[in-house]
Amino acid sequence: MGPVRLNHAVLFVADLARAERFYTEVFGMVVAAREPQANAVFLRLPRSGNHHDLGLFGVGPAAPPKQRGGIGLYHLAWQVDTIDELEQARRTLAEAGAYSGESSHGATKSVYGADPDGNEFEIMWMLPRSDWGSYENAAPVDRLDLAAEVSKWSGVRTAGSL
């Protein structure tokens, strides 16, 4: 077996229409496909080459809520191409009431949020590989000074070909 990357994620959500609205309005995703028999929608990021990046399956409001710290998925991490896009993501999440924090992991800079069902996610930007230095084998959780990072890295693209 030789996987090369995670292609997409699938989430169970209480209210499919609400979740679809969140991911299309906040992330700018577009609907790639709908599957009414499964109460599902498949979404694609605007610059993605995937058929879909996120699947949402509506299970109804009677489903038990997600338990933070329980077994299962902790969060999804979405990469942006520039530190400037990370700064914009922080503003967008704050405006949507979905922002929950931020941190520096050395080689990556991150902001965090949660969707209406409590599914947590990370929006992250990665330093150029040549600048990882001592972070090559480390992942600290430090305070993020986003203004300083933007001042240093503005315009530097690191997501590869989109």
Image (cartoon, rainbow, N blue to C red):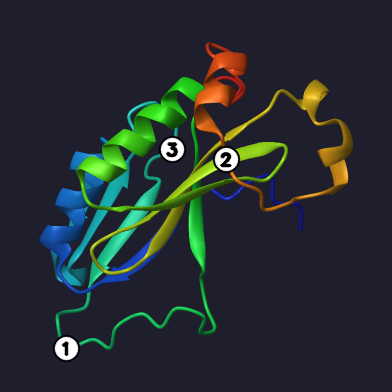
Rendering coords of residue 92 (x, y %): 28, 37
> If the image is split into quadrants, where does the N terminus sit?
bottom right
Give, as a three-letter code, the residue at label 3: Asn
Q: CA separation, marks 3 and 2?
A: 31 Å
Q: Is residue 125 above or below residue 1?
A: above
Q: Which mark is residue 62?
A: 1
Q: Which mark is residue 115?
A: none
Q: Is residue 52 above or below residue 34?
A: above
Decide: marks 1, 3 in contact (CB < 8 A)? no
Give, as a three-letter code, the residue at label 1: Ala
Decide: marks 3, 2 in contact (CB < 8 A)? no
Q: Secondary structure at mark 1?
A: loop
Determine whether, in the image, residue 52 is placed left or right of residue 30.
Answer: right
Determine whether, in the image, residue 59 is placed left or right of residue 106.
Answer: left
Visible residue check, residue 105: yes
Decide: marks 1, 2 in contact (CB < 8 A)? no
Q: Earlier in the sequence, mark 1 or mark 2?
A: 1
Q: Secondary structure at mark 3?
A: loop
Give me the residue at 33% from left, 40% from top. 44
Q: For the residues carrying marks 1 and 2, which lies nearer the camera in this image? A: 2
Give me the residue at 61% from left, 22% from top. 160
Residue that label 2 marks: 144
Question: Residue 5 versus residue 72: which sits nearer the camera?
Answer: 72
Q: CA separation, marks 1 and 3?
A: 32 Å
Q: CA separation, marks 1 and 2?
A: 38 Å
Residue that label 3 marks: 50
